[in-house]
Image (cartoon, rainbow, N blue to C red):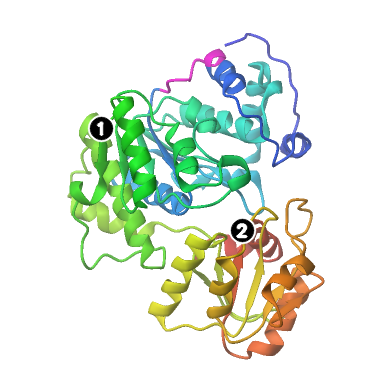
Amino acid sequence: MSETNTVHFQAYDEVEAYLAKLGLFHMDMSLDRITAVLDEVELRRPPYAVAQVLGTNGKGSTSTFLAALGQAAGLDTGLFTSPHFVTPRERVRVNGHMLDEDEWCDLANDIMNAGGGTLTYFEFITVLAVLAFHDYEVHLAVFEAGLGGMYDATTAIASDVTVYAPIAMDHEQVLGERLEDIARDKAGAIRHNVPVVTHVQDEAALAVLRDVAAQKGARLHMAEEMVTMPQDARFGLTGAHQRDNACLALGAFKLLAESHGWNPPPIMDWDDVKELAFADAWIAGRMQEVPAQADHPALILDGAHNEHAIAALKEALRLRGDKPAAIIFGCMGDKVLDGIVPLLLSMTDGPVFLPPIAENERAMNPEELAKVLGERARVSASLGEALRQARKLAGEREVLLCGSLYLLGEFFTLRPACLERE
């Protein structure tokens, strides 16, 4: 690493301002920049075990379950996820805790001194996570991919297992218009001779994963053939699909534990580890219930924002016997709405409130969305107004707030306490 010790940032606010200037959505399809910086800090192959989690839906939950398994087994564990709701610090956690602002400032200076001035927003925070996990001497680091796989920044890090949550149609303008195209981009993260694990997967996507894995000599494992899930397991994350995400995480953890010789703490066995991890795993904005307040109704918060995820959300609500009084929804402008709209309308007999997503140039205009949704659409001037309108309508019933994670982020800015598990 370079011996230069220039101070680029004096305080965390300066780091956040720098990241904002880079642009949250700026992408540059190449791994050259991040590879150069990781080489400079000598961490392209970190000393800790690395699991990379890819897919379209469920990769955040799978990553969280995998990190929870590590912690339950007594391992110091790092978790890198995206996006964030309120602060970028949410993206990098060690043993479930965010780093403090001074640590972010120190790490950001280290990155800049290693040539990090060339990095994009996502690349910069990926390198920051790699450095942080090294400083904390974690045993296991779980990296959730951002977009795609072939050129995702997390693919620049040498990994010990590549984990695939369900692949579905999303980000077609970037990854391709067919499921096979999307799967092939995500399969670009498969490394030579590094095992691959998946579970619930569309046949077309699975065929691509099998093909690329075979080409690279990487054995592909099906999680359900590797592990046994406890029938009566309690999950901190709600929804039937979370059992599948937990199974996938367990399969990946089994491979890592076997290859690294990890064993549970002396007073526990593997069943204890599973029980503790599944119950403790939790993420804000996944089937999260929020009690009513004066300015908003009782809410169910969920980041389902594409057809596959919204279908899973609908089934989870059906199994609970819930039919929300109304829905508050927003999405990005690149979303294909043909399959999404019928699902939204079928989940409630009430209106669908459409607020703008503040300060987000990629968000779909509510008026455009209303034209597609039809007569039950209600355009709101802001999320706050939508919440107040829904409060008057719903009474004691719940309202579903779903769609873009950036819309949920706006809610968490209004109610930051809801970011933590009660």
Quarter of the image that includes the N terminus: top right
Q: Amino acid at mark 1?
A: Arg
Q: Residue at x 51, y 29 (%)?
A: 130
Specify the farthest residue to the front. Answer: 178
Q: Are marks 2 and 1 in contact (CB under 8 Å)?
A: no
Asked if residue 42 lies in the magenta stretch, the reply is yes
Which residue is disc 2 drawn over? Answer: 336
User: Range of the magenta residues?
Assistant: 39-46
Task: Name the amino acid type tagged 2.
Answer: Val
Left or right of 89? Residue 142 is: left
Counting from the top left corner in percent of width and height, residue 36 is at 58, 16
| Residue 381 falls inside the magenta stretch | no
Where disc 1 sits, the SS reads loop
Name of the residue lying farthest toward the right:
381
User: Of residues 77 and 171, which is closer to you in this image?
Assistant: 171
Above or below residue 256? Residue 63 is below
Q: Which mark is residue 219?
A: 1
* Number of other residues with Cα within 10 Å of mark 1, as a class: few under 14, some 14 to 19, many 20 or more: some
Decide: is 293 above or below 55.
below
Residue 267 visible? The answer is no
Of tags 2 and 1, the one toward the viewer is: 2
Q: Name the magenta segment's main secondary structure.
A: loop
Q: CA distance from mark 2 to mark 1?
A: 34 Å
Q: Quadrant of residue 216?
A: top left
**How far across and how far down the image is residue 75, in percent?**
33, 39
SS category of the residue bearing label 2: loop
Residue 214, given in percent of the width and then of the height, sits at 29, 29
